[in-house]
Amino acid sequence: MTAELAAALPAVVAVLALGLWAVSTVGMKVRAIDAANSAAIAAARGEDPQAVAAAYLPDGASVSVSTDDTVARAAVAAPVRPLGPLTPPMTITADAAAPMEPGLPQ
């Protein structure tokens, strides 16, 4: 029994690490989507989209916003390392759009 456990333990640890990595990555994706949605809505209302999105994102993330006469668009890019320095860095991105509020100065 001990030999079988010793042989299977690395596989169990690898599956656990992969699961933690996936949960952490999906959590950051949700945060990036929330940040992009909030930034797009803030830009459509004439507010500061950077300040609104900053509450959702880690340090080093970027938010870019573009507007035209009818739509405000926000794109978020957040560099993450889901398991810290043990994994390579990756960039999570999200995009959102919101209709411009009527009556705002151009």
Image: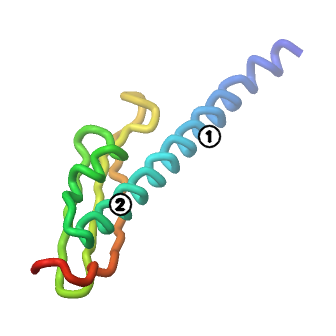
Q: Determine the CA span between mark 2 and mark 1.
A: 29 Å
Q: Residue at x 20, y 82 (%)?
A: 103
The residue indicated by pointer 2 is 38
Q: Quadrant of the N terminus?
A: top right
Pick the front one: 1 or 85:
85
Q: Is residue 10 left or right of residue 54?
A: right
x 17%, y 83%: residue: 68
Q: Percent from the top left, x then y, of residue 21?
A: 53, 40
Residue 93 sits in quarter: bottom left
Residue that sits furthest to the right in the current view: 1
Q: Name the residue type under label 1.
A: Gly
Secondary structure of the residue carrying numbered label 2: helix
Instruction: Name the foreground residue: 105 vs 25.
Output: 105
Q: On the image, numbered disc 1 is attached to which residue?
A: 19
Question: In the image as oriented, which residue stretches furthest toward the front?
Answer: 103
Residue drawn at x 29%, y 55% as measured from the top left: 77
Viewed as shown, does residue 103 lie left or right of 23? Answer: left
The answer to which quarter of the image holds residue 22 is top right
Q: Amino acid at mark 2?
A: Ser
